[in-house]
Image (cartoon, rainbow, N blue to C red):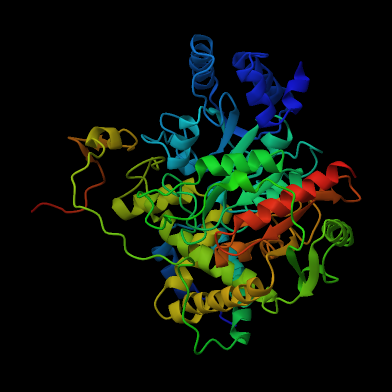
């Protein structure tokens, strides 16, 4: 019976609709699996709400077997805990929001519910999405389901761990500098960071507003793309939401990628990249060549500048966005204080973890008068140069291929002592956020520790079609490997 | 390389609304100096004629009719406040009466 959990989301949906299995029984298996795995992938489980929704959907199915069924009918979805869910605690993995229960849903949640998806819980993550290993969570580190000694990646580590551990069929993450793609890579699943402005950020607890995008994590390309299609919509509640772009992603689930032009930046396969990662990426390149793609080396001379620019901008935006957590409107308020300012300071001292404080301080500094031009504006100018460099590449190539991370999955406890080293491991993911382009992460092999190696594919703005086709074809080719 | 002295750190603490212990201050100075040295790598690039880029996709103003729409009730929003009174957020006294 637990083989059921190995099925893809689209297979489960079919079994439910064909009444081969009851939704309630699937939920029983999932909640049992979550407890058995004990990977700390969830902060909050929504058992009561999930069973209630399952009953409602099952009744609809019995009453009217031929009635309309949503694209996610009966599918259990896990939600990263920085996405607001009405009536369900949303902590962003921080102590400062330990008791925050939103009064409204993020737009993506309404869209999932409209398509009959079932929200089964809120997943663990790095505090306020700041981290690359899901170890900065106030609620403890997330374990990698493939080997518990290793991290799940971050910041959407709980979502990736839940999908890889078969604790849900699909999940939402958020990606500010690689936070969907990198944990998906470390857990051997598929993650998509959509083009900036595709998916509404309304109800996402903001980290870096000009970089943040919500996106799907799933066990295969088809499931990830189907979930993306559900959550991607124009939303007047997000002032950066884009209207009138192609959002019918599922029609690109085809393996016809003959003549697709793929560029591989030579800087991304330099000697500083782990040998196993390089080897797996080279094998992936061969697969694409066999599929009829035109693969060529290209250059990204600004690669060494992306992480410095990214951390300057992300920290600046974070320091501004996190001002709102001050003990007045929601969450924690310190017990003892003298006056308003002391209350702010004590609340934030108590409520924020080390990594969050580090970024708030750096961000406050680079935005302060006297340093604003030298650091913050400088980073925005470098951001423009980086974007121009990618724009130029997309004139020649449909897709850029890259590793997800220059390193193999680290073990728990290895990363937090040297923050700059940890930041540098984001070198291949942050460009997509600085430039706004879409990126997909898919597994492409294993390393010497039997842990998965991830590959990324990028395309120009709103050209998800190219990376979906390429990823789908690669996945299909890999099934025969 | 930018050195973070006590005065600068005091200023950052005010801006960041943080209250650091002595140990945290020592660590914060070290962290910030290392981080600033790291991001100063950007100075290798000539950006004199480059426009700062803050928004990445093409967007333009979208106008709409100025219509009234319902919003949240005050008590709904206040339900998450650590303290509230008379339908308002309650904060420590900020103005002293004569």
- Whether residue A459 is visible to the viewer of this picture, yes or no, is yes
- The quarter of the picture where the C terminus of chain B appears is bottom left
Q: Kindly identify the residue that appears in the image at 60 percent across and 83 percent down.
A: B1
Left or right position of B33 against A271: left
Quarter where residue A171 is shown = top right
* Depth check, front residue: A316 or A75: A75
Quarter where residue A28 is shown = top right
* Depth check, front residue: A480 or B96: A480
Residue B26 image offset from top left, x and y in percent:
58, 65
Q: Residue furthest left?
A: B98
Q: Kindly identify the residue that appears in the image at 88 percent across and 45 percent down.
A: A450
Left or right position of A26 against A345: right
B72, above or below A397, in the image: above
A364, above or below B20, in the image: below
Residue A438 image offset from top left, x and y in percent:
60, 58
Count of numbered circles on the image: 0
Residue A268 image offset from top left, x and y in percent:
77, 68
Left or right position of A250 against A37: left
A92, above or below A301, in the image: above
Q: Kindly identify the residue that appears in the image at 58 percent across and 55 percent down.
A: A355
* Depth check, front residue: A292 or A72: A292
Q: Kindly identify the residue that appears in the image at 54 percent across and 54 percent down.
A: A356
Residue A330 image offset from top left, x and y in percent:
37, 41
* Depth check, front residue: A165 or B98: A165
């Amino acid at each position: 019976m637990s083989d059921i959990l190995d099925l893809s989301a689209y297979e489960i949906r079919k079994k439910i609709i064909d009444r081969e299995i009851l939704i309630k029984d699937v939920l029983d298996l999932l909640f049992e699996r979550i407890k058995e795995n004990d990977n700390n992938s969830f902060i909050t489980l929504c058992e009561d709400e999930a069973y209630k929704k399952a009953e409602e959907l099952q009744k609809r199915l019995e009453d009217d077997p031929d009635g309309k069924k949503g694209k996610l009918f009966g599918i259990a979805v896990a939600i990263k805990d920085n996405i607001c869910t009405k009536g369900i605690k949303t902590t962003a993995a921080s102590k400062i929001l330990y008791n925050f229960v939103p009064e409204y849903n993020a737009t993506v949640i309404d869209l999932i519910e409209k398509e009959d998806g079932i929200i089964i819980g809120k997943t663990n993550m790095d505090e306020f999405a700041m981290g690359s290993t899901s170890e900065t969570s106030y609620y403890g580190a997330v374990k990698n389901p493939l080997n518990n000694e290793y991290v799940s990646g971050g910041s959407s580590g709980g979502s990736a761990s839940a999908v890889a551990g078969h604790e849900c069929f699909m999940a939402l993450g958020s990606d500010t500098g690689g936070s969907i793609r990198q944990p998906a890579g470390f857990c051997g699943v598929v993650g998509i960071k959509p083009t900036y402005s595709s998916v509404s950020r309304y109800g996402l607890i903001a980290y870096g507003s000009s970089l943040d995008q919500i996106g799907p994590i799933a066990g295969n390309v088809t499931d990830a793309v189907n979930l993306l299609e559900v959550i991607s919509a124009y939303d007047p509640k997000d002032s950066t939401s884009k209207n009138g772009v192609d959002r019918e992603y599922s029609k690109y689930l085809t393996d016809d990628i003959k003549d697709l032009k793929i560029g591989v930046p030579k800087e991304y396969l330099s000697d500083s990249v782990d040998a196993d990662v390089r080897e797996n990426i080279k094998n992936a390149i061969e697969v694409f060549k066999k599929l009829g793609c035109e693969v060529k080396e290209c250059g990204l001379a600004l690669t060494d500048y992306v992480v410095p620019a990214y951390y300057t901008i992300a920290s600046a935006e974070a320091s501004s966005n996190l001002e709102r957590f001050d003990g007045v409107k929601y969450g924690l308020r310190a017990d003892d204080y003298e006056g308003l300012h002391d209350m702010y300071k004590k609340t934030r001292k108590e409520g924020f973890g080390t990594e969050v404080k580090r970024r708030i301080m750096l961000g406050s500094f680079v935005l302060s008068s006297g340093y604003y031009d030298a650091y913050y504006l400088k980073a925005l100018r470098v951001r423009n140069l980086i974007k121009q460099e990618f724009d130029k590449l997309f004139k020649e190539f449909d897709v850029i291929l890259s590793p997800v991370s220059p390193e193999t999955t680290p073990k728990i406890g290895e990363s937090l002592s040297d923050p700059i080293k940890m930041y540098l491991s984001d070198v291949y993911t942050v460009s997509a956020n600085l430039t706004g382009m879409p990126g997909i992460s898919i597994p492409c092999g294993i390393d010497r520790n039997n842990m998965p190696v991830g590959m990324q594919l990028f395309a120009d703005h709103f050209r998800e079609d190219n990376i979906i086709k390429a990823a789908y074809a690669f996945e299909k080719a890999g099934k025969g490997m | 390389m930018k050195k973070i002295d006590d005065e600068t750190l005091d200023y950052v603490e005010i801006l960041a609304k943080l209250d650091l212990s002595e140990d945290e201050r020592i660590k914060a100075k070290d962290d910030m100096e290392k981080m600033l040295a790291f991001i100063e790598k950007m100075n290798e690039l000539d950006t004199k004629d480059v426009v700062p880029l803050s928004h990445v996709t093409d967007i333009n103003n979208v106008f709409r009719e100025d219509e009234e729409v319902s919003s949240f009730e005050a008590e709904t929003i206040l339900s998450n406040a650590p303290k509230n009174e008379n339908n308002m957020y309650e904060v420590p006294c900020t103005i002293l009466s004569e």
